[in-house]
Image: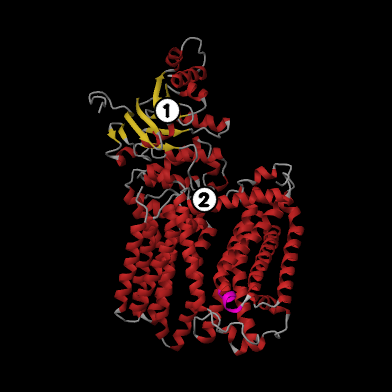
Amino acid sequence: MNFISLSEPAPALEIVGLHKRFDRPAVDGFDLAVRTGEFYALLGPNGAGKTTILRMVAGLLRPDAGAIRIFGVDALADPVAAKQVVAWVSDEPMIYDKLTPFEYLEFVAGLWGVDAATAQTRARDLVGWLGLSDHAHERCEGFSKGMRQKVALAGALVHDPRLIVLDEPLTGLDAGSARQVKEVLRARVRAGGAVVMTTHILEVAERMADRIGVIAAGRLIAQGTLEELRERAGSGRASLEDAFLALVADEAAA
Amino acid sequence: MSAPGTVAWLARHEFRLAWRDWRSMIAAGRRRRGRTILATLAVFALFMHGVAFVMLPRDIGAGEIDKTTLLVVTGCVVLSFSLLLSQSLESVTRAFYARFDLDLILSSPMLARRVFTVRIAIVALSLAGMAALLAAPFIDVLLLRDGWRWLGAYAVVAAMGAVAAACAVALTVALFRAIGARRTRLVAQIVAAVIGAAFVIMLQAAAIMSYGTFSRFAILQSDAVVARAPAADSVVWWPARAALGDPVSISAVLAASLILLALAIAAFAPRFGEHAVAAAGAAQMAPRRQRAAAIRPASPARALRHKEWTLLLRDPWLASQTLMQLLYLLPPALMLWRSFAEGTAGLVLLVPVLVMAAGQLAGGLAWLAISGEDAPDLVATAPVPAGQILRAKVEAVMGAVAVVFAPFLVALAFAAPLSAFVAALGIAVAGAAATTIQLWFRAQAKRSHFRRRQTSSRIATFAEAFSSIAWAGTAALAAAGTWFAVFAAVIALAVLGGVRLISPAPA
């Protein structure tokens, strides 16, 4: 396997030759390397395989072939060690209606083995950052989609993950909530974590991501900074949207 | 083809949805599975006809119809009606609260009362159809033996469906007005479950109090009840007479039930939109505050157990559904109480009841903990081996079963220590077996779909029931001190082995 040599610092996420097939190939030889302290956005049309890739990284799906390393840990050989440093947030927040945000965070902290004092401090900080303080002790059953997503995000952060994997985390959020989530994610990256996120909101990728990967038919067809993607897509591509559409169209035509 | 927007058009739409829902439930998207299940159902129907043939006395309804016959038939009608009313309340509540298409329909220019008219009529029809299917083996055998007059029983079944739907509508709307939309859903569902169980339990409790027997009809045939019952020509007996084939009673019962249903629809349909909107508002529940507490240190296993118990305690509907089996422990509890005064020999009978109830309770709880996990991704991405997660969930289930049954076992231990010991062992084994079956048949589902768990895997449901029955039988024989318990245990293990063989391969 072509993992990066041991003399270099291990990337936050390294994916090599990933394959997954359902009725048809969903992921077809996907390679990716995300550095520590990097915000990486994964773009692609519907059905391109983005969610399947992220679910394999989070340990929710087993690949047919390929390798996944998270901070140097082989996620397929030692999933428990890999999961210790990863957080997964899906577009559909999975929380418990009958628990309060605080109780939810207590549960997640228990699952990740965070000691009570640390969990208490982090939970308090997170509900404050995410504007949930007034609702920290109310059951989640009456919460809006945005509030539920913020609770799920707080759960993802309470165990201080080094790699955060998010699948369309801003879907359905209002502008204020989306901004809060983006700020929290940027803060994690500044603190040395890594974020891999899929999104259909190209403006988010354009403004937040250090690098952007474009995926089509289960393969990475282009990646780089916004400037690099514009260059690759050809002259006259002013925005990421133009570049993205041109790249996907080229791939479809090939 | 009916014109769009008419009652007939809506009815066609509803029937199409109901048919496709039923078909996908049966076939689960696989044509062959659908055919296999239909063939199995046909064999089951034949078997039930055989059972009915053996069970029904040859002289039923023959000769002069006396008050005892009318009492027993009326008892059967009331028993069936209580079950239908229970189902009807459930369906009517769903008509108000199931939001998947109400938002679309209510935002259209369609008159809301039309929607309600069609939905309540369909509830009545589906109830009648369900009751007819269940009663068919018995009615068909009577038709074969005793002629066409028994077709009246089908008419009574149809009438019961209409009356149950009408009563359920009236009761639900009354609840809406009395306690508001938010509480109605929970209360109606609990009332439905209690009504479903109450009649059987009351009959059993009364029979035990009076005669020390589990026979449900003994009390209805007692001299005291017969003497106090209305005269044989009373209107009270019309449904029973209709079931027994009296043409005048059939016409009267059918007409009265249809008028009742029509009145319920006419009275309550115009308010349907209003109630549905209120129910939608109730879905956005006012947040409930919990006591603030500091985060306690917890291992992953402890966190999982604590979460399972908290979720169960905080959901009164789920708790009521899960604990409903315990209502059936009321009659044995009465027997226990009576036995303190009259000796302890009868207490052996308690052991299988406790073991059976434990198996059923454990099955329900195991489904909630294992299949009904609302955040499966969260738990699956935790750095905890899958085996440890499952072990913690099983501990949560068995812990809950232990808490529920401990008081019964302690009480039993004072009266009959050996029976208590055997019951404790049986409860542990039946609970473990039911939990294991749920593990073998686990399939991710929403916790709120608890009521549909029995339809999502009928094999698991039957396996759970057979296993509980087999362990209950084993425990009964062991408590009676016979070595036949060993053979019963072998049968119970064989049931489990058979279930393992047909269980789906792990994903």
Left or right of B75? Residue A17 is left
Label 2 marks a residue whose chain is B
Q: Which residue is mark 2?
A: B24
Within 10 Å of the Cα at label 2, are there few (<14), some (14-19), or many (20+) other Cα atoms?
some
Q: Amino acid at mark 1?
A: Ala
Can you tell which of label 2 and label 1 is closer to the viewer?
A: 2
What colouring does the structure picture have?
secondary structure
Q: From the top left corner, tell me how far across and down residue A23 is, in percent.
A: 41, 37
Residue A102 visible in the shown view: yes
Given the image, what chain letter belongs to the residue carrying mark 1? Answer: A
Per the image, the residue denoted by label 1 is A217
Residue at left offset 48%, top offset 9%: A235
Q: Nearer the viewer, residue A254 or A239?
A: A254
Classify mark 1: helix, strand or loop. loop
A1 left or right of B177 in image: left
Secondary structure at badge 2 equals helix
Which quadrant of the figure has residue B263? bottom right
* In the depicted structure, whether residue B221 falls above or below residue B400: below
Residue visible at 72% across and 63% down in the picture: B261
The residue positioned farthest toward the top in the image shown:
A235
Structural distance between the alpha carbons of marks 2 and 1: 31 Å
**Residue A74 image offset from top left, x and y in percent:** 28, 35
Q: Position of residue B428 (x, y in %)?
A: 35, 67
Tell me the magenta residue range.
B141-146
Q: Is residue A63 above or below residue B162?
A: above
